[in-house]
Image (spheres, rainbow, N blue to C red):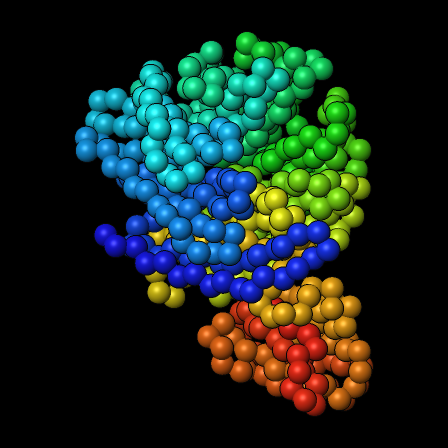
Amino acid sequence: MKAYFTIISWFITFSALHCQTTFEFHRTNPMDEISRSIIEDGEGNIYFPVENFQYALIVKHSNEGDLLDSIQIINPNGTCNIGEFIRYDEDHFIALGYWSSDSTSELWYVLFDNNLQLIEDKKIDSVSGMVYDFKHIINQNQNIVFMAHYLSPAISSFDICLYEITFSGSIIRKVFFDSQLLFNQGFTLLENVDENNYKIFTRLPLPMRFSCFLNLVDSNFNVIDNNGYFDEKIYTHNSAKWISDSTYLLTGKRVITEPEEWGIGIHKMSISDSILSSRYFGESDLVEWPGLYKNLDFISTDNIFFAGTKNSWWYPFQQEPSWIMLNILDSDLNLKHQQFYGGDAYYLVNAILATQDSGCVMACSRYDYLTQDEVFDVYILKVNKDGLLVGTPETESEIEDQCRLYPNPGGETLTIDIPQPGLRLTMSDISGIVRFGRYLENRHNILPVSALPTGMYFYRIVNENDEAICVGKWIKL
């Protein structure tokens, strides 16, 4: 079946240090598809797998959004899937997935070069069934350690496995856990080099999902400790990353029962797993979820990207819009920027990658409940260091300093602060049709916008010569 690609690219804007580019990529296909891994090469090109659990597909984009190449691999005797990318060196990357037929299911290791040429292809025995949904780290021995789910053919349920493999795909050790160890869903892992062990973050299956565990596992994958954890801070410990030799960041879901509130949160943790500081995001009348597979990344600790979904209360196919939410923090968890994207369909954040130009890429799922019949599309969004999609020659600092539109997202009223009176505002929907316009008589303006339909709008504030003073996006809840 032919797939159709829609790409929207913006002009390049310059910051003091980097040339930053932004783009959106929307892949539409009659099949249900997902992407949850992203890598970048030295030229800033972006690679991601498209998972439909029938065949393997890899897509390569330039950092400006141009579709450069793709490769599709079909298993003639069954199905195959690629779900995780690992950078091998400057010119190559590893893809992990499964290769399955009616009688066997094997761990699949593939080595590609940056031109998507297949260099090596290995099928690795996985006695306990189909292995998928990978989370990996590179350990102190420069081996790949990954946690994954496996589907047991005997009981038709999933549990957790741990592998240590070399970069050439040779297995050093593997352990398949089962639910009797009090968990069957894994989220993320860290290596504690000082203690020569691993921190494994897991939880129980539904409906006991509030029961989460921080498991200490030695270098041979023996469980040292299995600590249960839940309170009104965060659970479902989705992503973790060291921020120094003695502290790490941990993200997850936040639930408050009285009054009921579903938000997301991030902890700064000590090496001994005590909470040093926290930051929470969410509103009492909406449900927020952290990005499902990897929602935390950074190159500089002064610009930490933490992504989630706003207004996501029903999985998988919600009949209401949602918004991609990106929070940009410093190392003390102070919020530097918060941006929202979407609102025209149901979006879910799957994975995030901090890019070498100081921006980030988010791999998301998109479901248009008005036109689609319960299939997700792949939606890739690249933004700059401030979380902005850049569509005009104005720099972000000029836009940020001169105008403020808030709240964003908003509802019944919109407040606009401008540098001088006598400017004009227009708002266009995603199809480019102007839906709202006002003459701004004052520097501080409060406008009624209740008549605007829910969705995302592109605003433009111009002077009497029709020169743009401020541009951006605003979301109506």
Which residue is rendered at x = 77% and y = 25% of the image?
A: 246
Q: Nearer the viewer, residue 467 or 313?
A: 467
Residue at far left of view = 77
Whether residue 60 is situated above or below residue 134 in the rendered picture: below
Q: Nearer the viewer, residue 118 or 106?
A: 118
Q: Position of residue 196 (x, y in %)?
A: 65, 12
Query: Viewed as shown, does residue 12 lie left or right of 419?
Result: left
Q: Looking at the image, can residue 205 be seen?
A: no
Query: Viewed as shown, does residue 469 lie left or right of 205?
Result: right
Q: Position of residue 189 (x, y in %)?
A: 59, 26
Which residue is rendered at x = 61% and y = 82% of the image?
A: 426
Which residue is rendered at x = 44% and y = 50% of the image?
A: 61
Whether residue 136 is situated above or below residue 386 in the rendered picture: above
**Which quadrant does the C terminus fall into?**
bottom right
Q: Position of residue 243 (x, y in %)?
A: 72, 33
Whether residue 115 is situated above or below residue 476 in the rendered picture: above
Which residue is rendered at x = 34% and y = 18% of the image?
A: 124
Q: Position of residue 438 (x, y in %)?
A: 66, 87
Q: Nearer the viewer, residue 299 or 310?
A: 299
Q: Looking at the image, can residue 46 be seen?
A: yes
Query: Viewed as shown, does residue 60 lie left or right of 256?
Result: left
Q: Quadrant of residue 436?
A: bottom right
Whether residue 13 is situated above or below residue 205 in the rendered picture: below
